[in-house]
Image: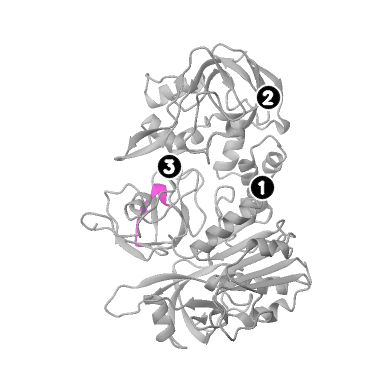
């Protein structure tokens, strides 16, 4: 019979890592005597990163003595101590290849249920002195797993581990870990995984995303780990497109229609996607790259973008003042995962300012699909006044073609001549409480686009009203990612020290181009040195949290990712530039 070898706890503390303190609770130490297992954790135990560890679904972490022996041989280490892998219970038996999600066990006075494998985390690399450990535990099928506490009680070293119930579907910890992190996602296994009610909600969401992607034939990237685009970009790098029309849409927004110079039809884009445009506003300066959302009707064979004139904006100033019909621009293929989902739930399109552009493309698609699949649609927009309300007439025409349609427009500072009731519905900032009184369907899927302050306020407000994060989809202008540690950062800048001598690395959204320097171990390290906002977790090519778009260029991977990124995507935690690269960061 399996038994508990050691019970280990630890509280968050600061440890040095790359010259700075890191808050972590992965240092666990054995406890003498018995310990109370509560709903959220063991008494005396804590977690620093509650997004990935701890809580009801991850109350107790388990690792096996057999895996200790395995890693001791593999890593040539003989000085491991219990708690070395951040586990609360070091056990004899209960191998990851035998224990199944949903299995229930009695240990001492408590009853536990297996909920998920260990989340790949870079802090394991710190604890082990080997930054590849998050990738190694997955690749070698020895992740460990979490338990939920069904019955609270005391446990201690030496307690027998009695299995009292089998989990449904009999999917082992190692099997479901590989199903998510590897490149193999068989549909039958995914169907089994989504039927396991004991699987933690986060992993349930990942399995459902993978299943949806497989059934829809979307194989570009790992949909369970990242918001991968639905399809690979239609072409690599940049293509020369010609401006065939331009129109003033408001006092500060102008649209541009782009077409193939040879008259051929451009590939269709998904509603919500964007283009990356490379411009050279001045002959004596380096090119600049900018992202512009597509806002034209679908299926026309041309692309329409809308550009807001920014104060001192180099790119927007050039396009507004100097670009003319007939000019040629360098343009990427449509890209991005902020796209309209083909589901039956209500759709809420919520924007502010020029954030209207990707949602306009979604609205046009919904109008065309009205006869085939009518959905309740809410159009909510915030503008300063009528002079700064782009595409207002286009939207009014479109919403007239939808039966299940509600529109609500806010003007933050309406002008004297602006007409309430016809041009706008309410003065002031967008007000969720007012919208709820009007019947806003919180059961719908929300698509949000606009400035950072607007996005943060709306996301927080919807979350407080009970809308789950999976139904709040966002697109943010500028550098979209937030630092993994949540700390404030200065504006992106060139790294300190002498410039490198390698290929140029352009962080497109941050408007920064720097020379690669081999003193950085990865593109992630370069981005951090430049204070470019990035997300990451494993730092070893497993979790895809650092995944971003690569507009142009080639990369070298070391180590190779367990599940390679899809076309047009990059994992920057384990890659360096082979050639000049343009990253969508």
> Left or right: 229 with respect to 434?
left
The nearer-to-camera label among 2 and 3 is 2
Mark 3–mark 1 contact, CB under 8 Å?
Answer: no
Mark 2–mark 1 contact, CB under 8 Å?
Answer: no
Task: State the quadrant of the N terminus.
Answer: top right
Mark 2 vs 1, N-terminal side: 2
Mark 3 vs 1, N-terminal side: 1
> Left or right: 276 with respect to 466?
left
Q: Residues within 10 Å of mark 3 (few under 14, many from 20)?
A: many
Q: Residues within 10 Å of mark 2 (few under 14, many from 20)?
A: many
Residue extending furthest left?
A: 498
Write the residue at 44% across / 67% down: 237
Mark 2 vs 3, N-terminal side: 2
Q: How many marks?
A: 3
Q: Is residue 580 magenta?
A: yes
Give the camera-side residue of 426 and 475.
Answer: 426
Above or below, 268 against 105 in this view is below
Q: Quickly name the residue at label 1.
A: 208
- Distance between mark 2 and mark 3 Cα atoms: 32 Å
In x, y percent, where is residue 383? 56, 74
Q: Is residue 170 magenta?
A: no
> Which stretch appears magenta?
572-581
In the rendered image, is residue 232 in sight? no
Give the camera-side residue of 285 and 136.
Answer: 285
SS for callout 1: helix
Q: Quickly name the residue at label 3.
A: 540
In x, y percent, where is residue 505? 34, 60
SS for callout 2: strand
In x, y percent, where is residue 538? 45, 41
**Residue 472, disc:** none
Write the residue at 65% across / 55% down: 471
Q: Quickly name the residue at label 2.
A: 104
């Amino acid at each position: 019979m399996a038994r508990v070898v050691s019970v280990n706890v630890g509280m968050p503390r600061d440890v040095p890592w790359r010259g700075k303190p890191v808050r972590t609770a992965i240092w666990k130490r054995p406890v003498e005597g018995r310990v109370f297992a509560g709903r959220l954790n063991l008494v005396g135990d804590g977690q620093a990163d509650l997004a990935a560890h701890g809580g009801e679904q991850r109350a107790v972490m388990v690792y096996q003595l057999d895996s200790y022996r395995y890693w001791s041989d593999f890593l040539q280490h003989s000085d491991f101590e219990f708690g070395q892998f951040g586990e609360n219970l070091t056990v004899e038996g209960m191998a990851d290849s035998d224990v199944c999600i949903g299995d229930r066990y009695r240990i001492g006075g408590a009853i536990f249920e297996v909920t998920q494998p260990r989340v790949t985390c870079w802090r394991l690399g710190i604890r082990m002195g080997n930054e590849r450990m998050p990738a190694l535990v997955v690749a070698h099928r020895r992740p460990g797993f979490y338990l939920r506490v069904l019955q609270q009680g005391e446990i201690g070293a030496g307690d027998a581990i009695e299995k009292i119930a089998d989990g449904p579907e009999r999917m082992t910890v190692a099997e479901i870990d590989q199903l998510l992190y590897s490149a193999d996602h068989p549909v039958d296994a995914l169907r089994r995984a989504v039927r396991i009610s004991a699987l933690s909600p986060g992993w349930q969401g990942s399995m459902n995303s993978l299943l949806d992607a497989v059934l829809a034939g979307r194989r570009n990237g790992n949909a369970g780990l990242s918001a991968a685009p639905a399809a690979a970009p239609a072409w690599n790098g940049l293509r020369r497109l010609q401006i065939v029309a331009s129109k003033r849409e408001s006092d500060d927004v102008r649209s541009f229609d782009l077409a193939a110079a040879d008259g051929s039809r451009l590939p269709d884009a998904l509603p919500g996607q964007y283009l990356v445009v490379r411009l050279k506003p001045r002959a004596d300066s380096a090119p600049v790259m900018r992202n512009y959302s597509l806002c034209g009707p679908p299926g026309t064979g041309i692309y329409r973008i809308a550009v807001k004139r920014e104060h001192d904006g180099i790119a927007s100033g050039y396009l507004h003042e100097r670009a003319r019909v007939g000019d040629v621009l360098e343009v990427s293929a449509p890209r991005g995962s902020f796209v309209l989902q083909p589901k039956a739930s209500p759709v809420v399109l919520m924007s502010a300012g020029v954030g209207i552009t990707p949602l306009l493309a979604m609205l046009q698609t919904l109008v065309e699909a009205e006869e085939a699949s009518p959905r309740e649609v809410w159009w909510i927009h915030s503008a300063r006044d009528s002079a700064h309300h782009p595409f207002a007439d286009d939207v009014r025409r479109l919403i007239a073609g939808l039966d299940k349609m509600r529109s609500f427009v806010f003007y933050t500072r309406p002008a004297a001549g602006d007409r309430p009731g016809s041009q706008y519905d309410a003065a002031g900032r967008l007000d969720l409480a007012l919208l709820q009184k009007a019947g806003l369907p919180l059961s719908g899927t929300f698509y949000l686009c606009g400035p950072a302050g607007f996005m943060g306020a709306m996301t927080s407000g919807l979350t407080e009203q009970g809308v789950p994060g999976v139904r709040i989809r966002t697109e943010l202008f500028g550098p979209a990612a937030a630092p993994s540690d949540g700390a404030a950062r200065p504006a992106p800048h060139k790294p300190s020290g002498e410039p490198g001598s390698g290929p140029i690395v352009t962080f497109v959204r941050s408007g920064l181009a720097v020379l690669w320097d081999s003193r950085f171990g990865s593109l992630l390290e370069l981005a951090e040195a430049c204070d470019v906002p990035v997300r990451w977790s494993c730092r070893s090519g497993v979790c895809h949290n650092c995944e971003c778009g690569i507009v142009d260029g080639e990369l070298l991977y070391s180590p190779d990712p367990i599940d390679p990124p899809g076309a047009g995507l990059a994992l920057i935690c384990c890659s360096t530039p082979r050639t000049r690269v343009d990253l969508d960061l």
